[in-house]
Image: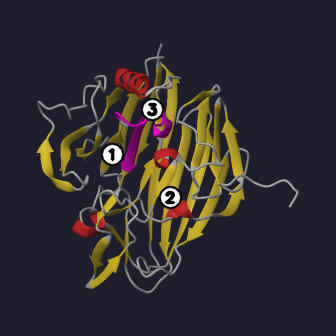
Amino acid sequence: MAGILPSRAGQEYTIHAGNYTAVVTEQGAALESFTINGKDIIVPFDPNYPVKACSGQILIPYPNRIEDGEYSFEGKDYSFPIDEHERHNSIHGLGYRYPWKLEALSTSSVSLSWRTPNLASYPFDLLVTVTYTVHADDGLQLSIEAFNNGDTNAPWALATHPWFASGSEAETTAKLDAANGECRLNLPARTHVTVNDRLLPTGLEAVDGTRYDLREGNPLGIQSFDDAWTDLDYAADGSVQAVFTRPDGIEVLITGDETITSFQVCNGFGWEASHKPAGVAIEPQTAYANAFKSGKDVIVIEPGRSSRTTISYAAREVK
């Protein structure tokens, strides 16, 4: 059949202000790209191919992993399909899998919505609205609001999954790891979440005196990270901010509101180059792995009520 088709990720919405430009896709309301002066702030993805490592996706109604896909909520048991087969976990929720409905579009802002389907694994009726807004001075703001349209309480958690570009054009695993290792990350967190070989939480430990103390903004180094940090230090206004600094002098500010309780950081250390984004994933989260199973930091949305989270990304050149 001849004709002009949209990308495999659906319609693409380009918004801009000042020196910033962002592209958002219909599928999953994902952030396909975000640039300043034409330089990548996040690692972009090709909308006609599977997204590498969830780059730019929104993880709802839960982020990260659920052990065996099984959880209980208010006396009832539920089970998500297993989609991380090597670790027998369910991973990263539902929202990235579906097309979203365009609600509003301007030169600097786009809003999309998605109503959760009636699935046995998650039968709760939520209307989720995501709004991306680019500001000339403050970068990209992302607002995620979930309204409970049902008549029962609903469990809820979220994360965003950008891979922040290292600025490198390396093409081998070793060179990509080296480029990531030169990047600095200031993460204002006092506690590291320990995990087992399935990347499921086993406990908590203070970061003091360990390689997980990232409060001074040291280089990430040649080492593996796929970890969560919690006990965050919030500013007076309730916000929390991580700072990612690249060797080329671009500094990226990742800011979350008071609903953000943890950050996940993954550098894909040692991954095969063809599957490895050229950067570091820094994921603001309202809850870390296995939250639906443990209940830790799960938000309960009552019927007729909403939960809202605001996250922003901004960049500046520091040299």
- CA separation, marks 3 and 1? 14 Å
Q: How many marks?
A: 3
Question: Residue 169: x and y, percent?
Answer: 53, 23
Left or right relative to 35: residue 148? left
Q: Nearer the viewer, residue 286 or 212?
A: 212
- CA separation, marks 2 and 1? 18 Å
The residue at 69%/57% (across/down) is 10
Q: Give the residue type that dot 3 points to.
A: Gly
Question: Residue 301: x and y, percent?
Answer: 39, 73
Q: Check residue 144 in the rendering and tell me which mark sits there, or answer none.
A: 2
Which-is-in-front pick, marks 2 and 1? 1
Check if mark 3's residue and mark 1's residue have beta carbons within 8 Å.
no
Viewport quadrant of the N terminus: bottom right
Magenta stretch: residue 306 in it? no
Q: Check residue 279 in the rendering and tell me which mark sits there, or answer none.
A: 3
Question: Residue 167: x and y, percent?
Answer: 50, 24
Q: Which label's residue is closer to the chain start, 3 or 1?
A: 1
- CA separation, marks 3 and 2? 24 Å
Which-is-in-front pick, marks 3 and 2? 3
Q: Residues within 10 Å of mark 3 (few under 14, many from 20)?
A: many
Q: Nearer the viewer, residue 81 or 71?
A: 81
Task: Indicate whether 192 appears above or below 306.
Answer: above
The residue at 39%/40% (across/down) is 282
Q: Which label's residue is closer to the chain start, 3 or 2?
A: 2
**Label 1 belongs to which residue?**
264
Q: Give the residue type that dot 2 points to.
A: Ile
- The boundaries of the magenta stretch are 269-284
Q: Check residue 311 in the rendering and tell me which mark sits there, or answer none.
A: none
Question: Residue 265: x and y, percent?
Answer: 34, 41
- Disc 2 secondary structure class: strand
